[in-house]
Image: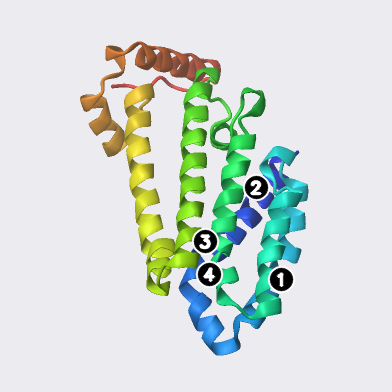
Amino acid sequence: MTDYRLARAALLAGLAFAAIAIGFPLFAEWVIGRFGVRALAATMIGVSLLCLRPVSSALPSELSFRTLDTAGLFALAAAALATGERTFLLLLPAWLYLALARIALASLRGGGSAIERFVRQMQPYAPDFIRPYCRQVTLLWAGLFAANALAIAALALFAPLGWWHAWTGWVTWAAFAAITAVEFVVRKAHFRIYDGGPIDSLFERVFPAERTEMGRRASAYKLEMRRSLGMPERRH
């Protein structure tokens, strides 16, 4: 697979995710009030038919939606179209997070992980010793996605609509932002690879690379790669 196809697929997947995970909770109530449940359900089916095939054909098989995933999406949308019940649409974000959890877990087969694939797209010269950490982070996000799917489903079925809106909106994204920030600090403290700049300078003072075995290993690898690529050595 070329980098262009992977980037295009990642963009399509990101847009689809944003539409359902961000846009849907924000605008679903307005769209339903203006056009009705069935109109929104039909739109979701149409958009899914347009997006799922190109995304699945461009991504590696272990990172794409499977038949069961797509069946769940169309079953919920079709049920909303047939019955006019809003609850089926409220379950769509739960379906999405559950599918993402399955994809994250599937990527762990064979020693790799979804996070490692993303890192290597951003940093092709990333060392092999990042693999265990990437697997742990992938497993963490798989668990978070699955837990969020269950919470959204429970709110859709048993809670007031306002709770569902709050959870799928600012609560989820505030929690994800906080978890991402904590993971960033943990990653910096673990690998201790610094490239300069105010943030790295602060971390370098708090977590000196020479204090840990991993920090020394990561620094040595980075120095070796800079030399092999003919790049100037970083001055402290």
**Disc 1 versus disc 3: nearer the observer:** 1
Identify the element where label 4 is drawn. helix
Q: Earlier in the sequence, mark 1 or mark 2?
A: 2
**Disc 1 versus disc 4: nearer the observer:** 1
Categorize mark 4 by other alpha carbons within 10 Å: few (<14), some (14-19), many (20+): many
Q: Amino acid at mark 4?
A: Phe
Q: Is residue 192 visible?
A: no
> Which residue position is annotated with label 1?
78
- 137 and 116: which is toward the camera: 137
> Which residue position is annotated with label 2?
7
Q: Amino acid at mark 3?
A: Ala
Identify the element where label 1 is drawn. helix
Q: Amino acid at mark 2?
A: Ala
Mark linked to residue 90: none
The image shows residue 47 at horizontal and vertical percentages of 69, 68
Residue at point 53% right, 23% down?
A: 131
- 146 and 113: which is toward the camera: 146
Q: Earlier in the sequence, mark 3 or mark 2?
A: 2
Say above or below: 170 vs 44.
Answer: above
Task: Report whether 197 appears left or right of 44.
Answer: left
> Which residue position is annotated with label 3?
21
Circles 1 and 2 in contact, beta carbons < 8 Å:
no
Q: CA distance from mark 3 to mark 2?
A: 20 Å
Identify the element where label 2 is drawn. helix
Q: Is residue 193 visible?
A: yes
Mark linked to residue 24: 4
